[in-house]
C-alpha cells in the first residue's frame, strides 16, 4: 500500500466513498483532502485535515469496503499525524458517530464539547455538519 498526498483529482473518489459511508460531503473541497491510500486494486482510502493554526480537525477518514480490516485506516491516521506535526499542528481534533473505539486505540481521548478550541468550534463540520451527539475526541501531537 502506498500513501500519497491527495490531489484535486481525488475529490470525486472521496465524495463517493464518504457518501457511501453516510459521512458529510457538502463542504468537502480539495483543500480538505490530505492523503490517499492506494492498494493493488486502486484507491483504498482517504483522510482529510483542516488546519486552524496549531490545532487541526481530522476529517473524512474513510476506507473502501474491500480494504477494511487491513490496516489502511490506521496507516492513514498515522501518516496524517506525521504530516500535521511537520506543519506545526500540536493537537488533532475529530468528531465521530461510530468510530470512537477505533480512535481510542490510536491514542485519541474523548473530550467534552466545552473544551473545544474556538477555531474548531467555528468549523462547518463542528457547527453544522456533525450531529450534536457525535463523539468529540482529540490527541496531542
Image (cartoon, rainbow, N blue to C red):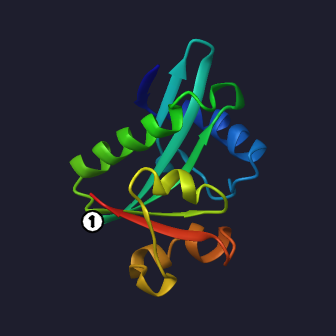
Q: Residue furthest top?
A: 40
Extreme residue in the bottom direction: 114
Q: 138 left or right of 127?
A: left
Q: Report crowding for label 1: few under 14, some 14 to 19, many 20 or more residues within 10 A (C-alpha).
A: few
**Residue 97 or residue 56, whichever sits in front:** 97
Residue for badge 1: 54
In which quadrant of the rendered image does the C terminus lie?
A: bottom left
Q: Does 91 sit above or below residue 6?
A: below
On the image, the x and y values in percent for residue 55 come to 33, 66
In the figure, residue 65 lies in which quadrant?
top right
Q: Secondary structure at mark 1?
A: loop
Query: Looking at the image, which residue is at 47% across and 57% down?
Result: 104
- Residue 110 position (above or below residue 98): below
53 relative position to 21: left or right: left
Depth check, front residue: 50 or 65: 65
Residue at image point 42% right, 60% down: 108
Residue 75 shows in this picture: yes
Residue 133: image location, x then y, percent:
67, 76
Please report the residue visible at 64 percent of the width from the left and 70 percent of the height from the top. 134
Position of 90 compared to 93: left or right?
left
Q: Nearer the viewer, residue 29 or 113?
A: 113
Residue 1 position, x and y percent, is: 47, 19
Q: Is residue 50 above or below residue 130?
A: above
- For image coordinates 63% across by 14% down, the residue present is 41
Q: Is residue 124 visible?
A: no
- Residue 29 position within the rendered picture, expressed as x and y whole percent measured from the top left: 57, 49
Amino acid at each position: 500500500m502506498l500513501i500519497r498526498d491527495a490531489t484535486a483529482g481525488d475529490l470525486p473518489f472521496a465524495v463517493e466513498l464518504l457518501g457511501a459511508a453516510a459521512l458529510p460531503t457538502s463542504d468537502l473541497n480539495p483543500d480538505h483532502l490530505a492523503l490517499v491510500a492506494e492498494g493493488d486494486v486502486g484507491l483504498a482510502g482517504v483522510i482529510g485535515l483542516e488546519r486552524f493554526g496549531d490545532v487541526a480537525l481530522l476529517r473524512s477518514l474513510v476506507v473502501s469496503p474491500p480494504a477494511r480490516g487491513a490496516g489502511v485506516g490506521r496507516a492513514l491516521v498515522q501518516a496524517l499525524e506525521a504530516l500535521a506535526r511537520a506543519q506545526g499542528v500540536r493537537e488533532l481534533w475529530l468528531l465521530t458517530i461510530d468510530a470512537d473505539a477505533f480512535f481510542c486505540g490510536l491514542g485519541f481521548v474523548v473530550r467534552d464539547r466545552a473544551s473545544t478550541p474556538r477555531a474548531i468550534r467555528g468549523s462547518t463540520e463542528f457547527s453544522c455538519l456533525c450531529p450534536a451527539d457525535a463523539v468529540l475526541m482529540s490527541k496531542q501531537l
